[in-house]
Amino acid sequence: MIYLDNSATTKPYKEVLDSFIKVSSEYFGNPSSLHEFGGKAERLLMQAREQIAQLLNVKNNEVYFTSGGTESNNLAIKGTALMYRKRGSHIITTGLEHASVRETADQLKELGYRISVIEPDSKGIVHAEDIENEITQETVLVSVMHVNNEIGSIQPINEIGEMLKKHARVIFHVDHVQGIGKVPLDLYQAHVDLCTISAHKFHGLKGNGVLYIRDGLRLSPLLSGGNQEWKMRSGTENVAGIVAMAKALRLTMNNMESHLSRLTSIKTYIMEEVGSIEGITVHTPENNSAPHIVNFSIKGFKAEVFVHALEERGIFISTTSACSSKKSAASSTLMAMGIPEKDAKSAVRVSLSYDNTKEEAETFIQEVKETVIRLREVMKS
């Protein structure tokens, strides 16, 4: 099997699974309990928070544990909108966002909030000046994805953050789910107020995530109850998953230091090779794109047909994002870039991890070439 759908989810590291099993088996107490058994779980929770804070280069009290990227994005956007509704009801986002941002904004629109959507250029990049042109006295939040989950384009987060310094009332949220462990982002330097990451995108377990909340910033919580996470996110903490997430983040950051150049070279190889095949158009930009995502269209083929044809050869890729891959609609990201609907519907995504090899990439390219020939022959008959 050659697994090339890492932007959908990654295979957990063995060390991560071992950590989860050990904590679940030996330290299963409730960290809110008064007894020593609960105290041990609480100390593990505190250690994991400290480790993640160090890896993100932020303060311990700025790390809030959630169930994953979708919850973190919802908490960031709805929590801001509800907390600052007396200040204003205008939110700015982009045409590149994940469904958990896009549909959250749509829900707020139904509640009376005004939503401005900034469209990207043909390379899948939004521009700070376009965002600034939409800012009014009513604007309370700007939400921009760091790395697009479909084509891998990297947004100018530092430039946007610098621009927003002139608009101190506007809160800046970044969805860093696809960038973490692949594309560095200094949250303080970029003046980010809120930042989302999700464990299963960096070889942790599903059901765990983090929302970075800048020290001093207040949000309206979505979940009320037991007052966990400083009353920001009630619910008994998933201590085993959180400890495993801290380990996964550390291992991924180590891999980024030692294997990023190799990953980038594999991605470049795939882009060049698929781009040379007749009838294939590469949508991932050569510059300002993440080292692990390649998106391309195959003229005349439906994306799902091509995905299943490769699956028969033991190669796993995807169409759009995993949250939208079972829908027949064309990619909203590609459509926002001006890609014709027919081409957008034939687009597929290859997404790498540090575990993938050049040999796997070579096999993938060979199978793509053979599959294109085979499918075209079937279409002619």
Image (spheres, rainbow, N blue to C red):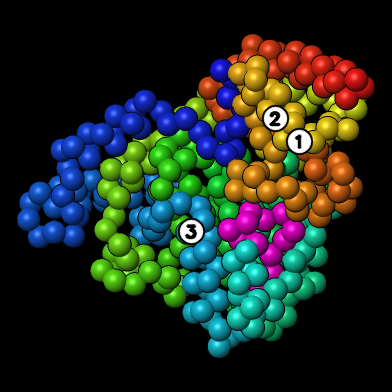
> Which quadrant would residue 7 be assigned to in this image?
top right
Range of residues picked out in magenta: 89-102
Does the stretch in magenta take in 249?
A: no
Identify which residue, 381 or 244, lies in the foreground.
381
Location of mark 3 (residue): 72
Location of mark 2 (residue): 307
Query: Looking at the figure, which quarter contains the N terminus?
Result: top right
Identify which residue, 302 or 25, lies in the foreground.
302
> Residue 140: x and y, percent?
61, 76
Q: Are the residues tagged 2 and 1 within 8 Å (C-beta)? A: yes
Say what amino acid the circle numbered 2 marks: Val
> Residue 158: x and y, percent?
66, 54
Location of mark 1 (residue): 303
Identify which residue, 19 or 363, lies in the foreground.
363
Number of the front mark, 3 or 2: 2
> Residue 185: x and y, percent?
58, 47
Q: Is residue 288 left or right of residue 26?
A: right
Kindly report the distance in space between the C-alpha atoms of the residues bearing marks 1 and 3: 30 Å
Residue located at (26% from left, 51% from top): 46
Say what amino acid the circle numbered 3 marks: Ser
Circle count: 3
